[in-house]
Amino acid sequence: MTVKEIQNEILRLKKENDICILAHAYQNRDIIEVADFMGDSFALSVKAQSVPQKTVIMCGVRFMAETVKILSPEKKVILSNPIAGCPMAEQMDKETISQVKENLPEYTVVAYVNTTTDLKTVCDVCVTSSSALKICKKIDNDKILFIPDCNLGDWIAKQIPEKQFKLLNGCCPTHAKMSAKDVEKAKALHPDALVLVHPECRPEVVERADYVGSTTGIMDFAKKSDKKEFIIGTENSIVTNLQLECPDKMFYPLSKDCICSNMKATTIVDLLNCCKGTFGEEIILDEDTRLKAKKCIDKMIELG
C-alpha cells in the first residue's frame, strides 16, 4: 500500500468505528494529515472532552494518553504505540516527590503536565509550558517546588524573582541536546533569522532566543511574524510543519539532532492498525487514582 492508500483507509475506518484521532505536533506529517486535531498535549486532552466520538486515539506519548483518560473517563482511550513514553515524565515518581514534600512542607508542588498520572496524585497544581508562568504568578505562596523540568522551571523562576523556587534535576533529553554553540552555528549560517525556542531548552539557549514559548506558541509566532526566516529550537517536526504551512518563509532547525524517538515511535501503519483494533494500548486508570490526579489539573484550570 502507498502512504496515500493507508491514509484513505484510516479516514474510512475512523468514520466507520467512531474514532477521533489526536496528533501531537511532533508527530510525522503523514499522521497529522489524517488526524482530527493537532496541537500541544493538554490542548488535545481538553479537545477530547467535547468530541462526539466514543474512542480516542492519542498519537503521542503515554502521559498524553493518560491525561485524555483523566479528563474523559467515559471514552475508550488508545495510545497509538505502547512503547511511546516520555523520558522526562519517567524521571520522577510518586515516592520520591512524596519524600521531598515531607522535607519541604511549606512549598507548593507544581507539576509540569509531562508527568505520570501516579505522580500527579501528590502534586498541588499542574501546568503546561504556555500556562506555567501565569499560574505560578497566581499561586498564593511564595515558595514553589517545580517538577520535573529544571529548565522550564528556571525560565519561570527568572521572571518571578519575588518567589522562591526549588528545582530538581529533571529535563527533556531531546531539548537538552541543544547548546549555545548550536545557536551560534545556526546564526552564522542564517544571520537574518529569528531564534524561536521551547523553554525546555537549556538556559544558555533560552538566553540567546528572540522568542521563548510552547510548541504552538512558536508556530503561532512564526506564522504571524513579518520576518521571513526562523531558526526553530524544538523537535524538528515543527520545522517541517512550518515549512509546509508557510511556504513563503524559511525555517531551519537549531540542531539536526533535536528528534524525539518516542514521538517518532508511532508510524502511519501503527495508526492504521489502531483503527482496525489490532494495535495500540487502551489506557486504564482506577477511579481513585484518576480523581486524585485530576485535582491538580482542576487547579490549573481554576488558576489559568
Image (cartoon, rainbow, N blue to C red):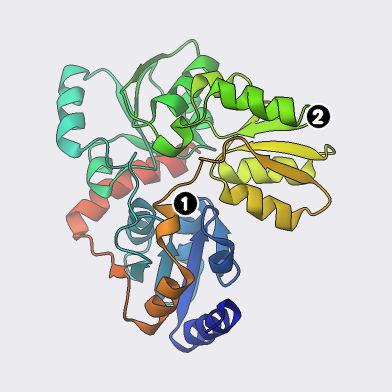
Foreground disc of the pair 1, 2: 2
Where does label 2 land, which residue? 192
Which one is nearer the viewer's eye here, 9 or 118?
9
Which one is nearer the viewer's eye here, 41 or 164?
41
The picture places residue 293, in percent across and down from the top left corner, at 28, 47
Marks 1 & 2, CB-CB < 8 Å contact = no
Q: Amino acid at mark 1?
A: Ser
Q: Amino acid at mark 2?
A: Asp
> 302 above or below 1?
above
Q: Is residue 96 visible?
A: yes
Please tell me whether mark 1 sits on a helix, a strand or a loop: helix
Please tell me whether mark 2 sits on a helix, a strand or a loop: loop
User: In the displayed image of the protein, which residue is found farthest to the top?
Assistant: 162
Whether residue 293 sits left or right of residue 160 in the image: it is left
Residue found 19% across the figure and 23% down from its top? 100
The picture places residue 93, in percent across and down from the top left corner, at 21, 38
Where does label 1 land, which residue? 41
The picture places residue 297, in percent across and down from the top left corner, at 38, 45
Residue found 27% across the figure and 42% down from its top? 90
The picture places residue 24, in percent across and down from the top left corner, at 50, 56
Q: Badge 1: few (under 14), some or many (20 or more) residues near its Cα, within 10 Å?
A: many
